[in-house]
Image (tube, rainbow, N blue to C red):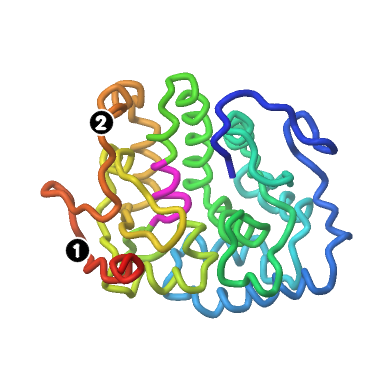
């Protein structure tokens, strides 16, 4: 939920110094709760056999199937008991330094608004459904919870090193649009996929995108799409391996090596890639033509 602001900025009126605001759960309307229930029911039916075991387990242990938009206080109490994380409301996109500081301290920032009923399939700015349904179940997994906290610490360092663009690509291709190889096959865990009805199918079933084995350096050099389905997805071997690579990598020399180099195009398959699927790219070409 960070924006492109790399300098300290004052919080908006009504927000605390750390940009948090009250969720004001009692202010949600019946229509807003119904919108959450519609979105939840649709995804809950679709995701078994598609989402990672960690995500599905998180939905269960956090009791997210309870009707209506979750109350952040109740949700945080369950989450804190499991992994030490909590969920805090913010008014929208927040500056990078604020975003990373919350994450490094195991606070997940979430918008407190929900999309309108006519926006079920697409919303440009993340809402409470994307943030809570998409992200929070994975925070109930101890390994992934440690990964995201480590990423937050890394984000604060990347700001100092002027390498945020490179680190942002790691977040995009894991936390937002990551796939994981499980014994039963590829599964989705990225919030941008699991919270999207159409991309939950596209990411696994469509012949168009590339699906490439995760490589830290490769990911951090690769452009991404913010306006449509991804043209490439990266597949981790496990959450344990993702955490291990993150905490064992010295990012400073890696930044020195890749900063200033041209980005790898979103549709590229390189000779050294472990290409699980070489996509046709028909979907993207159809959009351009």
Q: Is residue 203 left or right of residue 69?
A: left
Could you say which is closer to the camera, residue 84 or residue 11? 11
Q: Which residue lies furthest to the left in this view?
A: 271
Crowd rating for badge 1 (residues with CA inside 10 Å; few <14, some 14–19, many 20+) = some
Q: How many numbered discs?
A: 2
Q: In this view, does 52 lie to the left or right of 125?
A: left
Q: Is mark 1 on a helix, strand or loop?
A: loop
Does the residue at mark 2 contact the one at mark 1 (Cβ under 8 Å)? no
**Alpha carbon distance from label 2 to label 1:** 24 Å
Q: Is mark 2 on a helix, strand or loop?
A: loop
> Which residues, given as a range, are shown in magenta?
169-178
Asked if residue 168 is positioned above or below residue 268 in the image, the reply reads above
The residue pinned by badge 2 equals: 261
Q: Residue furthest right?
A: 26
The residue pinned by badge 1 equals: 278
Question: Residue 58, image x and y in percent?
Answer: 57, 60
User: Residue placed at 48% from the left, 23% from the top?
Assistant: 157
Classify residue 229 by image quadrant.
bottom left
**Residue 184 seen in render:** no
User: Residue placed at 11% from the left, 49% from the top?
Assistant: 271
- Of callouts 2 and 1, the N-terminal one: 2
Q: Is the magenta stretch mostly helix, strand or loop?
A: helix
Q: Is residue 128 left or right of residue 14?
A: left
Question: Residue 121, image x and y in percent?
Answer: 56, 71
Asked if residue 9 is positioned above or below residue 167 in the image, the reply reads above
Question: Residue 43, image x and y in percent?
Answer: 56, 74
């Amino acid at each position: 939920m960070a924006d492109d602001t790399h300098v300290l900025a004052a919080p908006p009126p009504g927000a605390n110094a750390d940009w948090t605001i009250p969720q004001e759960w009692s202010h949600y309307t019946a229509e807003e709760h119904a919108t959450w229930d519609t979105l939840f029911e649709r995804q809950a039916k679709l995701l078994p056999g598609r989402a990672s075991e960690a995500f599905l387990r998180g939905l269960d242990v956090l009791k997210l199937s309870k009707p209506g938009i979750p109350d952040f206080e109740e949700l945080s109490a369950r989450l804190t008991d499991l992994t030490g994380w909590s969920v805090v409301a913010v008014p929208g996109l927040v500056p990078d330094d604020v975003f990373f500081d919350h994450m490094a301290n195991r606070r997940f920032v979430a918008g407190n608004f929900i999309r309108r009923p006519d926006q079920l399939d697409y919303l440009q700015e993340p809402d409470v459904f994307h943030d809570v349904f998409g992200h929070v179940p994975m925070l109930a997994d101890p390994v992934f919870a440690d990964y995201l906290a480590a990423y937050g610490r890394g984000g604060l360092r990347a700001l100092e090193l002027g390498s945020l663009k490179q680190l942002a690509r790691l977040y995009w291709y894991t936390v937002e649009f990551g796939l994981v190889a499980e014994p039963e096959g590829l599964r989705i865990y990225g919030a941008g996929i699991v919270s999207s009805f159409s991309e939950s199918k596209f990411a696994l079933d469509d012949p168009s995108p590339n699906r490439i084995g995760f490589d830290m350096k490769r990911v951090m050099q690769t452009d991404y799409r913010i306006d449509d389905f991804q043209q490439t997805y990266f597949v981790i071997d496990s959450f344990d391996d993702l955490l291990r690579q993150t905490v064992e990598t010295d990012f400073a020399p890696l930044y020195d090596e890749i900063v200033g180099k041209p980005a790898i195009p979103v549709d590229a398959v390189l000779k050294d890639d472990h290409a699980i699927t070489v996509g046709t790219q028909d979907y993207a070409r159809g959009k351009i033509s």
